[in-house]
Amino acid sequence: MPAKKAIIIGAGVAGIATAIRLAIKGYAVEVFEANSYPGGKLSEIEQNGYRFDAGPSLFTMPQYVDELFELAGKTPADYFRYQKLDVVCNYFYEDGTRIKAYADTQQFAAELNRSTGEPVANILKYLANSRDIYTITNHVFLERSLHRLQTYLRWDTLRSVFKLPKIDAMRSMHKANSTFFKDERVVQFFDRYATYNGSNPYQAPATLNVIPHLEHHFGAYFPEGGMHAITQALVKLAEELGVKFRYNTRVNEVVVINGIAKGVRANGEHITGDLVVSNMDVWHTYKTMLNKHPELHPEKTLLRERSSSALIFYWGIKKSFPALGLHNIFFSADYRAEFEHIWQEQDIYRDPTVYINISSKLKSDDAPPGHENWFVMINVPANTGQDWDKLIADARANILKKLSEILREDIAALIECESILDPRSIEAKTSSYKGSIYGTASNDRFAAFLRHANSSSKVKGLYFCGGSVHPGGGIPLCLLSAKIVSEAPAASAG
């Protein structure tokens, strides 16, 4: 009997992971990708002897990548290696405060105490609270579908439901953090984790205080070969399992007949399949590929507030900075004003928080000798028609001024080459609606748990993975979305 066929739309990390899992289950899998390369946001840029990871730059919970190789009966280290970071990130404040976020919990707490005077006991209590939220939410809300009855019939689900008050969903991250800590610099430090899923700490629920646990318990890592090595390793595994990738092939339509997904149309061709999985932003999945079926559109979900976007400058810097590491944060002096500009004003604050990733610190051939490859990012609003050319020019000048003052160096004079990614080009390259990196925002109490389901309730055989659906954005959650899709009753029967 011929193997059932699964069609994956989009070769982002979730799409590749879904393809791997379904191939292991016996499906014949074909992946359609509009770009000439795989990876989606997890791709790379090369320019003038510099290499940049184009998108995600923080790697946590590598066990979810390893699991894919183990499921296939492979040794993960034969395909993909990584090292744990001793220092997760370097933080720079406008008042001159410097903080090294050590991976070791005790060392990290001592560093925060040394830099800010915040009592060690407060920091350890906070991290214990972060761990408790993770324990309650992980196996129930992150690793399983919230849209299947079976999830709620499990004892561990009921146990977590009884503990729901402990996930702190009724107050904002900032309110909770201001209660935990005395020093405003420490509050700002932990408020920043809202940006990990494109949200506002002054609105997002304190449930998102689970995120520090992922960094300070599981640790942060750097893949040999850079972040793009994740894509390369997974594509290699997928191809060895028989997955076929069709690049430069844009899917125009999901074919639905009598409420059943029967395949896709791409370049005028109808390709049949038993399952269709969209790794495309759920907004574009409905509005572009299911536009003939408006009765299927979950309009309330599609109208929800979008996450923030990003403005990224890829700079080749003709100097080395010993004070900087792989990950670096330069905080705004007025964090509340920064988020008001992003979310209320829909523009960019004059003093944005700046993130710099320098992969050449650990992968020396990413830049010429004595030089560094700077991935310089700020959080910006989604694209609603702003004058981006002016916003980018102003932001570039403000970023250069800020970095030059703190590092005491004319950074503009050191830029040897430059590429720019903004909300418009993010949408064009990755089909992320309005350039929103994480799909919908998590700025209301239960938004993080009410994302679009991983399967359609109206179309049999239609599934969804990736950062715009449950459980959310970022590499670990995208990989978990693939797991949830592969464990759906129909997909499991392959």
Image (cartoon, rainbow, N blue to C red):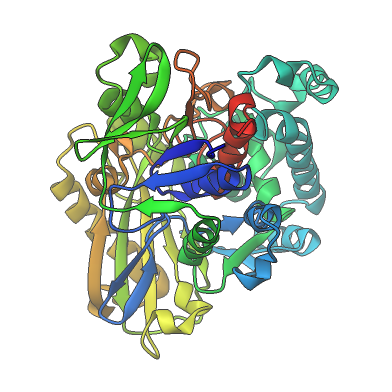
Q: Is residue 98 left or right of residue 261?
A: right
Please determine whether, in this image, residue 73 is positioned above or below residue 194. Answer: below
Quarter of the image for the N terminus: give it. top right
Residue 149 appears in the figure: yes
Quarter of the image for the C terminus: give it. top right
Please determine whether, in this image, residue 249 is positioned above or below residue 326. Answer: above
Q: Position of residue 64 (x, y in %)?
A: 65, 51
Residues 75 and 88: in front is 75
Residues 203 and 486: in front is 486
Give the residue displayed 64% in from the left and 23% down from the top. Answer: 169
Q: Position of residue 223 (x, y in %)?
A: 57, 68
Residues 359 and 411: in front is 359
Q: Answer with the quarter of the image where residue 88 lies.
A: bottom right
Q: Answer with the quarter of the image where residue 260 lies.
A: top left
Q: Position of residue 77 (x, y in %)?
A: 67, 70
Residues 346 and 7: in front is 7
Q: Is residue 433 left or right of residue 438?
A: left
Give the residue displayed 77% in from the left and 31% down from the top. Answer: 136
Residue 40 appears in the figure: no
